Amino acid sequence: MRLHALAATAFFVGVSASSLATSAVAADLIWQVENPFRFFKSTRSFALHEAAFNAVRGNGALPADVVWRIERKLNDPDCKDASTPDKCADTAGPHYQQSRLGWAA
């Protein structure tokens, strides 16, 4: 009888130890949704917006005009002088043709 009780105790200790080891490994998982915003067809589109948000936000507090800043980050053409369209075309960067159409293009 004692042998059965000892075997049962050893079994439960073994099961408990293995479940603790499994839960420690499961706690180390990092989950990431592939396409967290359902209105974007590709993950690349979401990544573009996420990068613009992170660039605008920085490390400080969230600015009051965060939406405007994100739109500017996404839509401003790649040029050094954006004061007029002609000056922007004259100082165009390598991604000018693509960026001047805006992010939705």
Image (cartoon, grey):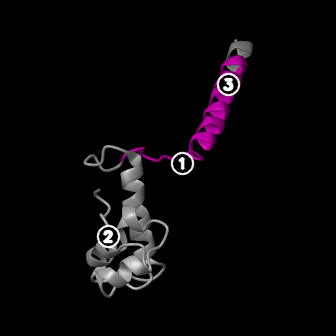
SS at badge 2: helix
- What residue is shown at x 62% (from left), y 38% (from top)? 20
Q: Are marks 1 and 2 in contact (CB under 8 Å)?
A: no
Locate residue 20 relative to residue 69 in the image: left or right. Answer: right
Q: Is residue 87 magenta?
A: no
In terms of depth relative to the viewer, which is nearer, 27 or 67? Answer: 67
Extreme bottom residue here?
83
* Circle 1 residue: 30
Report whether 14 appears left or right of 98.
Answer: right
- Residue at figure coordinates x 38%, y 64% from the top left: 97
How far, Cα to Cα, is label 1 from label 3? Answer: 35 Å
Labels 3 & 2 near each other (Cβ < 8 A): no
Relative height, residue 22 to residue 67 (above, below): above
Q: Which of the 4 image quarters holds residue 56?
A: bottom left
Mark closest to the chain's N terminus, 1 or 2: 1
Three-letter code for the amino acid on which mark 3 is drawn: Thr
Tell me residue 83's x, y (percent): 32, 88
Examine the rendered structure and indicate whether residue 103 appears above or below residue 40: below
Locate the C terminus by quadrant: bottom left
Residue on which disc 2 sits: 75
